[in-house]
Image (cartoon, rainbow, N blue to C red):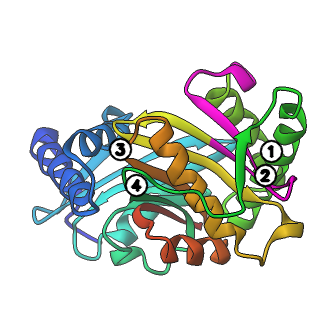
């Protein structure tokens, strides 16, 4: 493709890019403080991005290292038919795959497989727990067993999403758990729950209050495999809503990996809308 060159004025692009990102999050139902907090996350490392233009639109790309792989990222694309240029730019710099973060639908990247989604739902002021379900705090003695099970499931989810090898997934898991739980069970802002029916633990929950303005993040709302198919998945969503209000927040956010169609259907049916999603292809 001809006519695409490095942009001489990044400020003109950046102002429009940030406005479009904010509009996307507002349209997804985010409060203004939350939309701006998400914008801050979206523009991390922006000074390292390469911005190009054909005079009618913009392309913003970078190549970086991620879990042992060289990865291209397309951060912005408003040039008609500009995807080919962006992918070639990444490939020429050694990228093994190309990733995008999208709000408001896949657009030009509909053929990129979904690797993950962030979803969000506002929570009513006084959510009720389902009848017959008891929720209690996970004990510190139960934490090591919970951690081992949680980590194994996380690695499996990453591999199933198709973006990383098992070795890369394990490295990512180690890094993510160390970052989110630096003090383990006693990490401030984090709460761990056991869900019981008739005195038997049927699942667990892990949430982070104040993750973003007014938002509790549900890192895990897990129903054990041997108890699935009995409606406990919806009960776990109710526990997440209850925990969100216990922490003083108004909305709950969670992540789902690509390929987990069962979870996606559950989140659709319980009102979790897609805030943004991540897609990628191998080059």
* Earlier residue among tags 1 and 3: 3
* Label 4 neighbour load within 10 Å: few <14, some 14-19, many 20+: some
171 versus 263 height, above or below:
above
Residue 55 percent across, percent down from the top left: 10, 61
Which residue is at 19% across, 65% downward?
3
Where residue 186 sits in the image (x, y, percent)?
A: 69, 20
Residue picked out by circle 4: 123
Q: Nearer the viewer, residue 261 or 106?
A: 261
Quarter in which the N terminus is drawn:
bottom left
Disc 1 to disc 2: CB gap under 8 Å: yes
Q: Which residues are magenta?
A: 183-206
| Rendered residue at 79%/46% (across/down) | 150
Quarter of the picture holding the C terminus: bottom right
Label 1, label 2: how far apart the Cα atoms are: 6 Å
* Labels in figure, total: 4
Identify the element where label 3 is drawn: helix
Q: Which secondary structure lies at badge 4?
A: loop
Q: Nearer the viewer, mark 4 or mark 1?
A: 4
Q: Kindly report which numbered mark, 1 or 2, lies closer to the viewer in this rendering.
A: 1
Residue topped by disc 1: 151
Seen at 60% across and 54% down, the residue is: 239
In the image shown, does 140 or 60 lie closer to the viewer? 140
Along the polypeptide, which appears first: circle 4 or circle 1? Answer: 4
Residues under labels 2 and 3: Cα distance? 25 Å
Name the mark nearer the viewer: 1 or 3. Answer: 1
- Report which residue position mark 2 lands on: 155
Magenta stretch contains residue 199: yes
Q: Which residue is mark 3?
A: 42
Structural crowding at the residue carrying mark 3, measured as other residues with C-alpha within 10 Å and reported as few (<14), some (14–19) or many (≥20):
some
């Amino acid at each position: 493709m001809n006519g695409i060159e490095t942009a001489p004025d990044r400020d003109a692009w950046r102002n429009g890019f940030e406005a479009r990102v904010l509009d996307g999050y507002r349209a997804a139902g985010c409060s203004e403080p939350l939309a701006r907090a998400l914008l801050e996350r979206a523009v991390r490392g922006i000074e390292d991005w390469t911005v190009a233009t054909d005079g009618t639109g913009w392309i913003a790309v970078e190549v970086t290292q991620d879990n042992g792989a060289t990865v291209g990222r397309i951060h912005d694309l408003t040039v008609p038919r500009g995807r080919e240029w962006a992918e070639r730019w990444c490939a020429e710099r050694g990228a093994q795959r190309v990733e995008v973060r999208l709000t408001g639908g896949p657009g030009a990247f509909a053929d990129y497989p979904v690797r993950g989604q962030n979803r969000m739902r506002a929570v009513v002021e006084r959510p009720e727990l389902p009848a017959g379900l008891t929720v209690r705090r996970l004990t510190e003695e139960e934490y090591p067993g919970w951690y081992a099970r949680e980590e194994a499931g996380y690695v499996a989810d990453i591999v199933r999403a198709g973006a990383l090898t098992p070795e890369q997934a394990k490295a990512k898991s180690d890094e993510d758990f160390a970052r989110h739980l630096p003090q383990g069970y006693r990490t401030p802002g984090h709460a761990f729950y056991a869900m019981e029916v008739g005195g038997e633990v049927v699942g667990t929950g892990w949430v982070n209050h104040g993750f973003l303005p007014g938002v509790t993040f549900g890192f895990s709302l897990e129903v054990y495999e041997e108890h699935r198919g009995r409606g406990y998945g919806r009960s776990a969503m109710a526990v997440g809503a209850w925990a969100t209000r216990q922490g003083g927040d108004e909305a709950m956010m969670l992540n789902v990996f690509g390929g987990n169609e069962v979870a996606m259907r559950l989140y659709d049916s319980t009102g979790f809308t897609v805030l943004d999603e991540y897609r990628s292809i191998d080059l």
